[in-house]
Amino acid sequence: MSFDFVERYYGRSFYRGQQVVCTDGARRERGLVVKATHYVYVLVDGERHARPWHPADVEPVTAQNVEASS
């Protein structure tokens, strides 16, 4: 399982090093994509270890979601 699996199964495309915003309920966190299995592993800003996130909870950084998370 990999980035290809995530794209085929969830219809969401990610790549290693991509800046993303992760949403967990009311909390939004920015970070970098590290790897993918059936989850997307994101190294959240300020943390030392990547955490798995469901692909539906991860979106690429855009001008709109950067302003919303500030």
Image (cartoon, grey):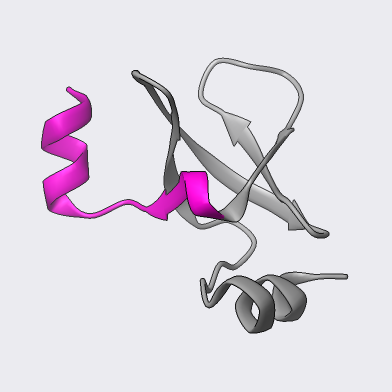
**Residue drawn at the location 56% of the way across and 67% of the way down:** 14
Residue 11 position (above or below residue 22): below
* Percent of width and height locating residue 20: 43, 47
Q: Quadrant of residue 48?
A: top right
Total labels drawn: 0
**Residue drawn at the location 64% of the way across and 33% of the way down:** 43
Residue 42 position (above or below residue 15): above
* Percent of width and height locating residue 51: 72, 31
Would you say residue 68 sits in the magenta stretch?
A: yes
Would you say residue 20 sits in the magenta stretch?
A: no
Residue 49 position (above or below residue 36): above
Quarter that holds the N terminus: bottom right
Q: Quadrant of residue 41?
A: top right
Query: Which secondary structure is most common in the magenta stretch?
Result: helix
* Percent of width and height locating residue 49: 76, 24
In the displayed structure image, the side of residue 64 where residue 5 appears, left or right: right
**Residue drawn at the location 17% of the way across and 22% of the way down:** 70
* Percent of width and height locating residue 39: 73, 52
Q: Look at the image and give the residue range highlighted in magenta.
A: 56-70
In the displayed structure image, the side of residue 30 where residue 40 appears, left or right: right
Residue 8 position (above or below residue 42): below
Q: Nearer the viewer, residue 12 or 48?
A: 12
**Residue drawn at the location 53% of the way across and 74% of the way down:** 13
In the displayed structure image, the side of residue 45 where residue 27 appears, left or right: left
